[in-house]
Image (cartoon, grey):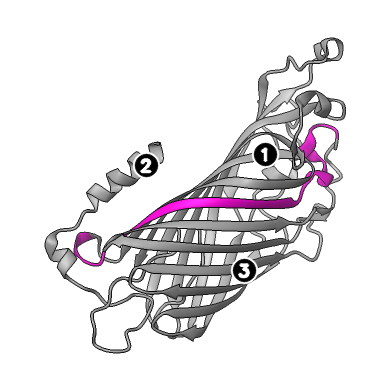
Amino acid sequence: MRLSFLGWAIALLLWPSKEIFAQVVRDSVFTCSDNCCCDIAVAPPAGVMISHVHRKGEWMLSYRLMNSATDGLLSGSSAIAANSVFTNYLMLPSSAQMNMHMFMAMYGVSNKLTLMTMFNYNSMSMEMAIFSNDAEHNHSSVAGKNNVMQTAGFGDVKVQALYDVLNSNKQQLVFSLGASLPSGNISLQGNSNDLVYTNSRLPYSMQMGSGTVDALTGISYMYHNRKIATGAQSTAVFRTYNNSVGYHLGNEYSLQAWMAYKYLNFLSTSVRAEYSVVNKISGKDASLYVYNEPSANPDNYGGQKLTLYLGSTWQIGSGIFKNNQLGVEYGLPVYQYVQGIQPRVSSFLYASWAFTF
């Protein structure tokens, strides 16, 4: 409900005049084959990072906020009770929030080649329930949310090249290739408020980066007309060697498809489905005691997830907001399968801004 109110509030702020409705602008992504009037290309959803190349000399700056929340625990695809977790671990995660602030710049070297760089700032907070001796007697957890793990910092920097294989009035096919550079800290320690990790290294999921140079690949297809855009994308992250701590994160694979419909000249709505696979961690951090809590155990990483998203995008072709684009997208996992014991992801939220010049 709050997302709906937010969407309409932004729409009212950006409502264009009749003159703006009457003005047509050159398509910023696709090229017209004749001198007809071109509408603004229907934008992809807010959560789609790479979908097209830019014209020669064109820049795009963008910011995205990605929030994910967890609630409860899974073993495989089934919910698991706290009591069964406490048979092997001293603590368990009761809930968590992660915010990723992503800043991206893209530049069109030519009409076919675009270069991209992206860095992010992450903040994570995980509330932990601690085992109580009373639980051994009454077979119930009396532990509260009495320990919080928190981290924040810059993540790994990503650089990529996008090459346009097919670009017509209505279609684009883009290959992307690049690397993730190990700029994120992988040796963050708990603070004085952390009852378990004080002055010791935090678990894998609380670190800012992978600690390795990782290969990034992708292929994106998009079909567009004046009212509808559909697209599909496949991406992968490959990690092949251990970092300085003694492990490497698992490879990541993603396949997604979306459709967006522009029912006003400046406003579209989208639906998106994303299926992702993450492999298990290889190696381990020898400083972590695996029975502290599930995230300290490298066997509790990796899995599969299917998420459905609903979003809206606002695009203005002229006036004070010309060449700006705002988007919001909300997602709910409809299927999750995890290796070992892991938090259950409850929701995703994307908010984006992009400016092309």
Measured along the vertical axis of the image, is residue 217 above or below residue 97? below
| Residue 242 visible in image | yes
Residues under labels 1 and 3: Cα distance?
Answer: 24 Å
Quarter placement of the N terminus? top left
Name the quadrant containing residue 217: bottom right
Q: Which amino acid, mark 3?
A: Ser
Q: Is residue 162 above or below residue 301?
A: below
Q: Residue at x 67, y 66 (%)?
A: 236
The x and y percentages for residue 146 are 67, 20
Q: Which residues are magenta?
A: 291-320
Q: Indicate which disc, 2 or 1, sits on the residue closer to the N terminus.
A: 2
Disc 3 marks which residue? 234
Instruction: Return the x and y of residue 251 as percentages of the image width and height.
Output: 74, 61
Q: Earlier in the sequence, mark 1 or mark 3?
A: 3
What's the distance in space between the residues labelled 2 and 1, CA to CA? 25 Å
Q: Which residue is mark 1?
A: 344
- Confirm or deny contact between disc 1 and disc 3 (CB under 8 A): no
On the image, numbered disc 2 is attached to which residue? 4
- Left or right, residue 298 beside residue 278: right
Measuring 59% from the left and 51% from the top, which residue is drawn there? 307
- Tell me the kind of residue under disc 2: Ser
| Mark 3 touches mark 2? (CB < 8 Å) | no
Q: Residues within 10 Å of mark 2 (few under 14, many from 20)?
A: few
Q: Amino acid at mark 1?
A: Arg
Q: Residue at x 68, y 62 (%)?
A: 253
Q: Nearer the viewer, residue 101 or 167?
A: 167
Judged from the image, the secondary structure of the residue bearing numbered disc 2 is helix
Q: Position of residue 114 (x, y in %)?
A: 48, 78
In the rendered structure, which disc, 3 or 2, sits on the residue that comes first in sequence?
Answer: 2
Q: Is residue 144 left or right of residue 153?
A: right
At mark 3, the secondary structure is strand
